[in-house]
Image (cartoon, rainbow, N blue to C red):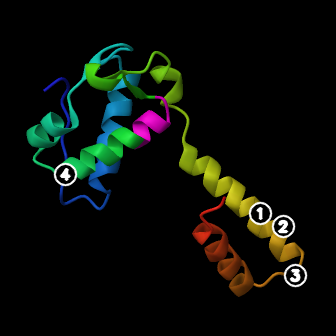
Amino acid sequence: MFMDIIIDVEDSTPLFSQLIDQIKEAVLNGKVNPGDAMPSIRQLANDLGVNNKTVAKAYSLLERDSVIQTKGYRGTFIHPNAVANCTVDLNVWVTRKLSETIVELRKAGATDSEIRIAFGNVMNDKTI
């Protein structure tokens, strides 16, 4: 395996999150470097004994965050800006933005029920 990844099925952290965290840690610690090849989804899933979809989800999120990049049929590689991008936590940003919006809506008088219904409607709107 290209790096030591240990998946703990007893841990309450989702498997894909464990994988993401360990890949980011390997990037930050210099165990893998920008341009290094990543194993294929199938190979890593096989090595770890997890479902291909688990690795695919982790890879998708890592690619979204520019920690890895897929180069078509040539494979998947550590992104040139991976070190800087590993410290960006999109979930923290999303939570902060939602919290700010909810505070603003509550100040305007919206009830939690109204906010939940509106949130559900917006999330289900495929035109956004």
Q: Marks 1 and 2: CB-CB under 8 Å?
A: yes
Residue that label 1 marks: 101
Q: Quadrant of residue 77?
A: top left
Q: Amino acid at mark 2?
A: Glu
Seen at 55% across and 50% down, the residue is 91
- Residue 43 badge: none
Q: Image point 42% across, 42% down: which residue?
A: 61
Q: Secondary structure at mark 1?
A: helix
Residue 122 location (% of width, % of height): 66, 69
Q: Please report the residue visible at 35 percent of the width from the left and 16 percent of the height from the top.
A: 30
Q: Is residue 44 above or below residue 11?
A: above
Name the residue beneath numbered marker 4. 8
Q: Amino acid at mark 1?
A: Thr
Find disc 3 in the rendering and name its residue. Answer: 109
**x, y percentage for residue 59?**
34, 39
Q: Look at the image and give the residue range highlighted in magenta.
A: 61-66
For label 2, the residue is: 104
Give yes or no for residue 113 being in the magenta stretch: no
Residue 87 in the image: state x and y as whole percent: 52, 32
User: Which quarter shows the N terminus?
Assistant: top left
Marks 1 and 2 sit apart, C-alpha to C-alpha, by: 5 Å
Label 1, residues with CA under 10 Å away: few <14, some 14-19, many ≥20:
few
The CA span between labels 1 and 3 is: 13 Å
Query: SS for tag 3?
Result: loop
Nearest to the observer: residue 115 or residue 127:
127
Q: Viewer-nearest of labels 4 and 2?
A: 2
Left or right: residue 60 compared with residue 87: left
Secondary structure mostly seen in magenta is helix
In the rendered structure, does residue 63 fall within the stretch colored magenta? yes
